[in-house]
């Protein structure tokens, strides 16, 4: 890669905005394309950044067409649908340098039945599970579970990708039966039913970059997926995150050796060279980490809280990864704490159509605040004004020397943002567990 390289990032949300900022900081990077992106990603950038929405994340051919148009030196496929569709494979076959796992490697995310069986084979601790290809059989199983234990907690999960919304909690037989019926709303992704035991514990997120043999890890994080305070309500794509997550501190070596290294080695044993980001969604259960899921890319919103801590040049990491030289890299990260609060349209993750097109006020003022980063997800810009154009609209990330201070700054910033008709929705309790730990 020569001086003045061009990077293309595949994705459209605040995660891709954060990734574009990481690349922008490299002296080697001259220009960035985000596809399809969103209007706010290209707003007030230091380097040339443009978004091109003439592609579909589920259509690798449309992404290849954009790659042939812009001829980037590097393509970073950051979004799960694009990975599952085989975008990396197609781009590589056409001569492009691509960061991200192949379709076969990304199966650890897009086929949750296969992923659970992989965990079982390589002794990666995980919840007990059963899978069913037919709805009546799934209903029969949950009926038997609740007949023997009326207090059971079960998760009904779609085996395919559902934008983080395919895991439905059940605390009764009626709820479990209803959740099984809801799987049809996920289309092809919901045709295989996973029924899993509901574990009790505290969740965490852990990220590694793998070149197929060696890996490097980043700061831990904690995501808040449910829509309502104290992790109640419907599942969303993520309403906020903190980094680092204190709950992982006693388990760092265990997590890296048992869940990261063993997964990468297990994939290689399966004939799969895992190159790209590997995400462990874990839970501490009875003082031991358990794997809830693997993803094959950065998480959203965790990426927004984790990646800004990186002091090592991000492009340097990517190049070392693609060259199989991660073992020679010493990653450096800062000591800051970060809190990410997601601003969403009222009604998200359900019907928020009444908010689409409403004006958003206060963004420009927040951009000027010290220690605050504002990243766009569902914002459109017309005539210099901002409008809601999605469920999750933006991420506000605050950094400070400790978590309580970062949290205070994040909520002070979001208090300056208003959506026409009082249509801004956000969780007011992001980071509450570690704030309590900090003061205890």
Image: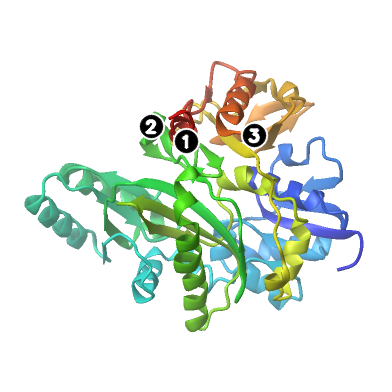
Q: In terms of image quadrants, where is residue 172?
A: top left
Q: Disc 3 or disc 2, which is closer to the eye?
A: 3
| Most distant residue in the right direction | 3
Report the residue marked by disc 2.
230
Measured from the top left, where is residue 129 in percent x and y?
27, 62
Horizontal side, residue 41 vs residue 246: left or right: right
Quarter in which the N terminus is drawn: bottom right
| Most distant residue in the front direction | 440
Among numbered discs 3 and 2, the one appearing first in the sequence: 2
Among numbered discs 1 and 3, the one appearing first in the sequence: 3
Q: Is mark 2 on a helix, strand or loop?
A: helix
How far apart are the two marked residues, 3 and 2, measured between alpha carbons?
25 Å
Q: Residue 401 carries which label?
A: 3
The residue that appears at 42% across and 66% down in the rendered structure is: 111
Q: What element carries label 1?
A: helix
**Which of the two residues, 332 or 123, is positioned nearer the viewer here?**
332
Quarter in which the C terminus is drawn: top left
The residue that appears at 14% across and 44% down in the rendered structure is: 151
* Any part of residue 385 in sight: yes
Q: How crowded is mark 2: few (under 14 residues within 10 Å), some or many (20 or more)?
A: some
Report the residue marked by disc 1.
434
| Most distant residue in the top direction | 421
């Amino acid at each position: 890669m020569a001086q003045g390289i061009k990077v293309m990032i595949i994705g459209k949300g605040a995660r891709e905005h954060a990734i574009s900022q990481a690349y922008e900081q490299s002296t080697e990077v001259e220009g960035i394309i985000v596809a399809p992106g969103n209007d706010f990603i290209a707003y007030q950038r230091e380097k040339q950044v443009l978004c091109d929405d003439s592609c579909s994340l589920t259509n690798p051919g449309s992404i290849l067409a954009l790659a042939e148009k812009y001829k980037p030196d590097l393509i970073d496929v950051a979004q799960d649908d694009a990975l599952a569709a085989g975008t990396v494979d197609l781009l590589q076959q056409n001569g492009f340098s691509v960061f991200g796992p192949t379709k076969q490697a990304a199966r650890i995310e897009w086929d949750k039945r296969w992923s659970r069986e992989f965990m079982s084979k390589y002794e990666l601790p995980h919840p007990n599970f059963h899978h069913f290809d037919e709805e009546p059989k799934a209903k029969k199983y949950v009926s038997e579970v609740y007949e023997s234990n009326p207090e059971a907690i079960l998760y009904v999960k779609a085996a395919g990708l559902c934008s983080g919304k395919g895991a439905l909690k059940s605390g009764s037989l009626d709820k479990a039966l209803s959740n099984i019926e809801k799987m049809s709303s996920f289309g092809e992704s919901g045709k295989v039913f996973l029924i899993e035991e509901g574990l009790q514990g505290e969740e965490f997120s852990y990220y590694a970059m793998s070149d197929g043999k060696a890996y490097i890890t980043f700061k831990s994080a904690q995501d808040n997926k449910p829509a309502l305070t104290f992790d109640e309500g419907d599942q969303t794509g993520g309403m906020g995150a903190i980094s680092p997550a204190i709950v992982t501190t006693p388990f760092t070596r265990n997590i890296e050796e048992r869940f990261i290294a063993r997964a990468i080695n297990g994939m290689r044993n399966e004939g799969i060279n895992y190159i790209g980001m590997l995400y462990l969604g874990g839970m501490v259960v009875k003082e031991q980490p358990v794997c809830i899921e693997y993803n094959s890319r950065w998480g959203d919103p965790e990426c927004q809280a984790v990646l800004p801590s990186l002091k090592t040049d991000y492009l340097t990491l990517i190049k070392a990864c693609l060259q199989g030289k991660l073992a020679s890299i010493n990653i450096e990260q800062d000591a800051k704490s970060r809190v990410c609060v997601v601003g969403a349209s009222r009604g998200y993750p359900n019907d928020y159509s009444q908010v689409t097109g409403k004006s958003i006020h206060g963004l420009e003022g927040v951009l000027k605040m010290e220690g605050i980063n504002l990243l766009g997800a569902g914002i459109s810009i017309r005539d210099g004004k901002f409008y809601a154009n999605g469920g999750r609209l933006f991420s506000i990330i605050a950094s400070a020397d400790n978590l309580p201070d970062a949290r205070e700054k994040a909520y002070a910033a979001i208090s300056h943002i208003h959506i026409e008709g009082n249509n801004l929705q956000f969780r007011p309790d992001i980071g509450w567990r570690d704030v309590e730990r900090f003061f205890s």
